[in-house]
Image (cartoon, rainbow, N blue to C red):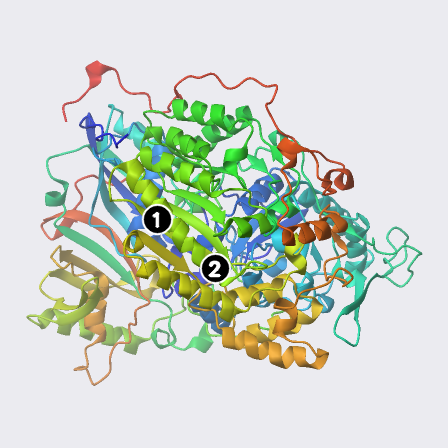
Amino acid sequence: MSRQPPVQQPPPVQKLWLRYAKRGRGRFASHRDFARAFERALRRAGAPLAYSSGFTPHPRISWANSVPTGAESESEYVAIGLAAVVDPAELAAALNATLPPGFALLAARPAGANLMAELTHSAWEITFPVWENTLIAPAEESSNPEAADLAADPKTAAGTDRPAPDTAQADQPNLSPDPPLLDYRAAPSGLSPAWADRLTRAVAWFLAQPDVPVSRQTKRGRRQFDARGPVVSLTVEPSPDCPNRPGLRLVSRHTVPLVRPDDVVQALDGIDALDGIAPGLGADCLIRRTAQGRLVQGRVVDPLPGPPPA
Amino acid sequence: MTAIPPSLFQRLEPLLARVKKPAQYVGGEVNSELKDWDQVQVHWCLAFPDAYEVGQPNQGIAILYEVLNQRDWILAERTYAIWPDLAHLMRQQGLPQFSWEGHRPVAAFDLLAVSLSSELGYTNLLELIDLAGLPLRSRDRGDDHPLVLIGGHVATNPEPITDFIDAAVMGDGEEAVLLVSALVRDWLRSGRRGGRARLLGQLAATGQVYVPSLYDVSYAADGMIQAITPLALPRLTDDGDGPGGAGPDLAPARVRKFTLTDLDAWPYPARPLVPVAETVHERYSVEIFRGCTRGCRFCQAGMITRPVRERSTTAIAQMVDAGLAATGLDEVGLLSLSSADHSEIKPLAKVLADRYQGTKVSLSLPSTRVDAFNVDLAAELARNGRRGGLTFAPEGGTERMRRVINKNVDEADLMATVETAFAQGWRQVKLYFMCGLPTEQDEDVLAIADLAGRVIATGRRAAQSRDVGCTISIGGFVPKPHTPFQWAAQAPAEVVDRRQRALKAKVRADRAFGRAITVRYQDGQPGLVEGLLARGDRRVAQVIEAVWRDGGRFDGWSEFFDFERWSQACQRQLAPWGIDLDWYTTRQRDEAEILPWDHLDVGLDRDWLWQDWLDSQDQASVPDCRWQGCSDCGVCPQLGVHSEVGPFDRPLIPLLPLARPTPLAPLAPTAQARV
């Protein structure tokens, strides 16, 4: 007996575009991690998946421009093919009921012509961690900083992993005592004016350049490319999570290779023309994509609208 | 009521951005449970001391997680070994070992229950205890520290780690964790009356929980164990405080393993966790039976899990259906120690293959049984599409070797099996063997090359194609407690390495078949350390601690294992006793020697084991009691149980194709949009 040729699968009956968010702990899932979790969520939700033909048929799921591991996003896109027609809103609700915490389905609609063609630009927020050199003086900070919400995740808000205030630790003779606190979400009492000033000057310098070369390790080795060209706008703004935190807003055009927010941070960090002092941004910044779509009058407009503001 | 422990996640989050595979640490997997701390009375932290990708799919943890969390008075969270990159940052930042569900400090739980399936996890156990902020040695722990409990196969000889644990449980965990929970609850309710000592005494008094501190081990001048002596139990029921008022009762002379009966009454895991981070096995697994009585003399799992207890086909089919719906997984594994041996495996395979025909669910039966029936089963299960590999385990290269280990397959069986496999369309088979078995000579290992050559010749004939292949996978044999080979001398690492290399050279030199055969083997040195830890006694604790203090971690991973570190620690720590690594590994024991685990009772009669050891040297076979009568291994009368084998007096599920109601009803055809 030899192996049978594979059965030809019928084409999908319905194609949908979905927009989803990665928040809080969900940001640590790699794209491959989320792809597996999403496929299983579709099955638990009872979605009538269409499959590709071949010896090992795969569900018809195509991904667009996923954010780097470690970044949050309010604007991720995936296109799926189904073997039966369903109500997109019902599918979104069924997925939201079964996705792991940290992921949320924001919108679903019948597919248009070409999803990638709709996604030409991204808007980003970049928040810097509370590092000693960003603060007025670490000693002035409260020893018990007010805990900020992990994220605007409804599952988080329901209390499933809301962080409790940092109370005194149990005896830990084997652990080093009293280490410096490194925290993204805690609210510092104030920002060092000198540090904020350096950040502002670095941004101004960056925008004034015709090009700023950076390099990044890719699958094909270290690649050098220009981080300035694709940047449409870059501004210093307080973090939306906490007004006392420094942050950046970035709008950039999608290019190959894609210039990511961490590339722009790297470009700023590498500036040594400013009194010989780098801003010291480090690689620990928190990145969030807030919108993805076409650029309309300087703003990025998503092809699928997000949920109404809470 | 103790304070609700804080979540450490906020402090952990910035560290996760800097480490490899951060998604493994965030928890929140589908089907995981985060209960309110103050709504339950007993808090368990279930630990697997290896990386998340290895530990998360563990079936034992998955079962106990559900058994415990189903009780409204118990919560169970999980923890795993933390990879060295994050462990280093956590120590810098003063963050302790945490639970995956609530990111709560492990030290806040009432119990830290560690599932140990391999001796090479011992250094990770020490790391876990230390990173949790607990005193490394059980004697230094106070009433507020969690009880450190271990289970898993190594619990049948936990002597090398008894300094670090409070108690060990052997056998099936389902009933054990509930018994322990009840005793812990009562002790907590009493305001921890009598302290930790009384709780340990109560656990020991059950006769089924091993509390090492209630036994004294003494050694003779020649290094042998002189005696294992039960000590007085602390006062268990009076109002007196502390262990001072010891009554006449001693700890039980022998501690018995737990044996679950009626597996249908324990259909777990029903809703296993679905990881987001990638793990080594991502399938829904059902144990179709527990235990094995084939009697392979090298196999500890087969000896310590007797008797055979089957799950009925009805219960299995129901678990598969519900488990797929609860997880969204599309692979099913039908697990056991020898899955083709289930009494109703043929109707079960047919029912499942029929049921999932036309869906994308793939079914697999991890069976290494050497017979054509096994191939037919694999073909039946693969009807639906994806076809897995075929693996057979002759274990020994010659008939003589196979009789020594009681693996009763002859070469004709093997050739008939591979002939069926190649005739049914497989182009590749995998064969498992062991190296370093008792009485083994170089010829026994070199004969594997000839056997593989005949497999290829048979395969080319059956497949009518030269395009067939065979992978030989060789494992170094490590003698284990509670087996007939517990008295055997382990082969020195040099001997194992020499024979494996010679085999590989012989296969390479074979012009006719060499290129169709792949040989895979591992170095002999990790096996020697495994042997030390498997048959070690309490003196080995100092070796383990020295290795861990020197940076030893993840010894099961070849990129971390460092034989030199173990070898030096052995020299330093064992010399005062006049013994060494060889004394524990390559030395043959005699019948009278007191073995470190002689007080631990898995039901096997010691005289039967000794006779089986003698039989092995006479190449005498012992039949399987499921088919050819009892050989008096002792398990059934000793444990008050018996084999539970079908056919079951229960109907099979109806042979209907799967029609699960879906929450997403397709819209009426008129509403279809053009897409």
- Amino acid carrying label 2: it is Glu
Residue A3 position within the rendered picture, expressed as x and y whole percent measured from the top left? 26, 32
Could you classify mark 2 by the number of other residues whose Cα lies within 10 Å: few (under 14), some (14-19), or many (20 or more)? few
Residue B165 position within the rendered picture, expressed as x and y whole percent measured from the top left? 68, 61
Residue B154 drawn above or below residue A306 = below
Residue A305 drawn above or below residue B479 = above
Occupied quadrant, residue B284: top left
Tag 2 secondary structure: helix
Report the disc number at residue B443.
2
Residue B27 in sight: yes
Chain under callout 1: B
Residue B457 position within the rendered picture, expressed as x and y whole percent measured from the top left? 32, 44
Chain under callout 2: B
Quick one: B125 or B218, which is closer to the camera?
Answer: B218
Quick one: B188 or B448, which is closer to the camera?
Answer: B448
Residue located 44% across and 17% down the image: B655
Residue located 46% across and 36% down the image: B371
Q: Is residue B669 left or right of residue B378?
A: left
Tag 1 secondary structure: strand
Question: How many discs mark residues in the rendered view?
Answer: 2
Quick one: A246 or B155, which is closer to the camera?
Answer: B155
**Are the residues under marks 2 and 1 on the same chain?**
yes
Circles 2 and 1 in contact, beta carbons < 8 Å:
no
Q: Is residue B336 left or right of residue B201?
A: left
Residue B130 drawn above or below residue B379 = below
Could you classify mark 1 by the number of other residues whose Cα lies within 10 Å: few (under 14), some (14-19), or many (20 or more)? many
According to the picture, the residue beneath numbered tag 1 turns out to be B470
- Amino acid carrying label 1: it is Cys
Residue located 30% across and 72% down the image: A282
Quick one: B279 or A276, which is closer to the camera?
Answer: B279
The image quadrant where one finds the C terminus of chain B is: top left
Residue B113 in sight: no
